């Protein structure tokens, strides 16, 4: 158990809908990252927050948005869902936001999103 | 261009033997971090080992060691004394020191340990 929690574990929804994925980082971690894992795209970095502020942006679509709250939990909002958004969405956390030792990311169990 | 390349889609190893999973990377940054993760069939991503670009010693964590060859830009994972529970996908990843700051993952290598 990494200490990172994600809810829900599974989500099935229809095209055009909007969903919210939730993540609670490990105790003491200030950085939260979101990733999308699909069969055709592999594991893709979406966005990073550090202590409530957006720190880095990856391949995140405009239909997707995220935020990190004062209690450090984070939410990823996916709207106008398309079939191609079906994937495993991971949240990860780390102590800081840099590249050094101690900044390894610990992943949550993921949310499997199925868009029908 | 691919930042992280894992050229072995699948690998087999006999139980109790050692195995090397290849990873090469591409960066112009001087400061970067290299990571290996394991993803069993249950789906979770498990952090295994970290190597910093300025670290002079190869990282080791139990049965895992990282063969870091900076000039060749390679960061191969060595698993010693393979166990059946090591069967999983293994991902190499890199985080660069620029403001971009995102983590790039390779396509992964599926390791199967044979009894």
Image (cartoon, coloured by chain):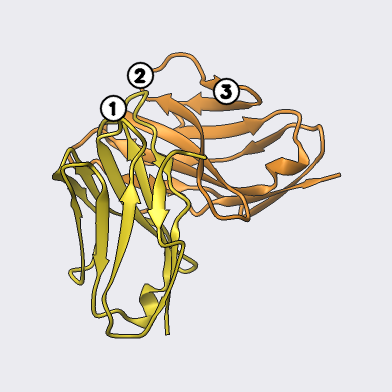
Chain colours: A yellow, B orange
Residue underneath mark 1? B31
Closer to the observer: label 3 or label 2? 3
Residue A72: horizontal and vertical position, in percent?
23, 42
| Furthest residue in direction right, as rendered | B115
Q: Label 3, on which residue?
A: B61
Q: Quadrant of residue B22?
A: top right
Of B39 and B74, nearer the camera is: B39
Instruction: Write down the quadrant of residue B30 in the picture.
Output: top left
Q: Which of B85/B33 is in front? A: B85
> Does A38 appear above or below B107?
below
Q: Which mark is residue B74?
A: none
- For disc 1, the chain is B
Marks 1 & 2, CB-CB < 8 Å contact: yes
Q: CA distance from mark 1 to mark 2?
A: 7 Å
Q: Are marks 3 and 2 on the same chain?
A: yes
For mark 1, does the 10 Å Cα neighbourhood hold few (<14), some (14 to 19), or many (20 or more) residues?
some
Question: Looking at the picture, how far across and down is residue A33, in whole percent?
Answer: 30, 47
**Dot 1 and dot 3 residues touching (CB under 8 Å):** no
Q: Is residue A29 above or below residue B40?
A: above
> Could you tell me how far apart the alpha carbons at marks 1 and 3 are, in whole angstroms?
22 Å
Check the picture and name the quadrant holding the N terminus of chain B. bottom left
Label 1's element? loop
Establish if B72 lies above or below A15. Answer: above
Quadrant assignment for the C terminus of chain B: top right
- Residue beneath the point at 48% across and 42% down: B92
Q: Residue tagged by mark 2?
A: B54
Residue B45 seen from this side: yes
Disc nearer the start of the sequence (3/2): 2
Q: Secondary structure at mark 3?
A: strand
Residue contact between numbered discs 3 and 2, judged by CB atoms under 8 Å: no
Chain letter for mark 3: B
Mark 1 or 3, closer to the camera: 3
């Amino acid at each position: 158990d990494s200490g990172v929690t994600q809810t829900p574990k599974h989500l099935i929804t229809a095209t055009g809908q909007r969903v919210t994925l939730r993540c609670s980082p490990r105790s003491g971690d200030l950085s939260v990252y979101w990733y999308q894992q699909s069969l055709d795209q592999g594991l893709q970095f979406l966005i990073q927050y550090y202590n409530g502020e957006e720190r880095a942006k990856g391949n995140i679509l405009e239909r997707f948005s995220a935020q990190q709250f004062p209690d450090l939990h984070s939410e990823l909002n996916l709207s106008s869902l398309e079939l191609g958004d079906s994937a495993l969405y991971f949240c990860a956390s780390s102590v800081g936001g840099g590249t050094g030792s101690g900044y390894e990311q610990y992943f949550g169990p993921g949310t499997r999103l199925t868009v029908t | 261009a691919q930042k992280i390349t894992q050229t072995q889609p699948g690998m087999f190893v006999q139980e109790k033997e050692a195995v090397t999973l290849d990873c090469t990377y591409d960066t112009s940054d001087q400061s970067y971090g290299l990571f290996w993760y394991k993803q069993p069939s249950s789906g979770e991503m498990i952090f295994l080992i970290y190597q910093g670009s300025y670290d002079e010693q190869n990282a080791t964590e139990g049965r895992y060691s990282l063969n870091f060859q900076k000039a060749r830009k390679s960061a191969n994972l060595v698993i010693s004394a393979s166990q059946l529970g090591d069967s999983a996908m293994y991902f190499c990843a890199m985080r660069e020191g620029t403001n971009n700051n995102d983590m790039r993952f390779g396509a992964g290598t599926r390791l199967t340990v044979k009894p």
